[in-house]
Amino acid sequence: MSANVDRRFPRGALLGAAALIVLSLGAAGFARLSGIGITQASEGTAVQSRILRFEDRSDGAVIVFDVRSGRIAAVLPPETNGFVRGVMRSMVRQRRREDLGSEPPFVLTKWSDGRLSIEDVATRERIELTAFGQTNVAAFARFLDNRSASR
């Protein structure tokens, strides 16, 4: 004994789904064409930069060198400066994926619009440090000071 079962999809649900898709595509297209809801980082001009190289020391410290002068810009003691170490680890990881050496430097740049970024010369990867908050920006901004090295 078999029951006659109506297997059609409910017409109202199908029309509702189609309307939702059309509305979503329309809103996305409108936003893209009008620029509403889109955030773009302005391209300011570089007001200060420093070319740096980071070198691990056997005791766990990291030495930050100013490439132009050859002088030490900072010494990061072991088990400190977690944000700096994390950012640099991620950039070095990208170098390893691309089989690049550790010699090319990094460029730390302060921009006219207040942003701070670090760029890997080897991979061209740039991290906008400002996105991580003022405390983390300060962790890198101190490397722009050419006068003294923190030990």
Image (cartoon, rainbow, N blue to C red):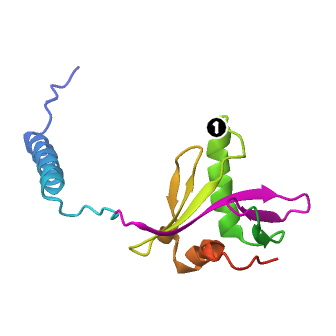
User: Are there few (<14), some (14-19), or many (20+) residues within 10 Å of tag 1?
Assistant: few
Give the quarter of the image for residue 30: bottom left
**What is the residue that sits farthest to the top in this orientation?**
1
Q: Quadrant of the N terminus?
A: top left
- Left/right placement of residue 5 relative to residue 111 reads left
Q: Which residues are magenta?
A: 43-69
Residue nearer the viewer, 66 or 127: 66
Percent x, y of residue 54: 73, 58
**What is the residue that sits farthest to the front in this orientation?**
69
Vertical arrangement, residue 66 with respect to residue 94, above or below: below
Give the quarter of the image for residue 77: bottom right
Residue at the spot 78% in from the left edge and 57% down from the top edge: 55
- Left/right placement of residue 135 relative to residue 14 reads right
Give the quarter of the image for residue 64: bottom right
Residue at the spot 18% in from the left edge and 59% down from the top edge: 35
Vertical arrangement, residue 134 with respect to residue 31, above or below: below
Residue type at the position of mark 1: Arg
Q: Quadrant of the C terminus?
A: bottom right
- Left/right placement of residue 81 relative to residue 77 reads left
Percent x, y of residue 37: 22, 64
Secondary structure, mark 1, is: helix
- Left/right placement of residue 11 relative to residue 150 reads left
Q: What residue is shown with label 1? A: 97
Vertical arrangement, residue 12 with respect to residue 3, above or below: below
Residue at the spot 58% in from the left edge and 48% down from the top edge: 121
Q: Is residue 44 magenta?
A: yes
Percent x, y of residue 106: 62, 55
Residue at the spot 91% in from the left edge and 62% down from the top edge: 59
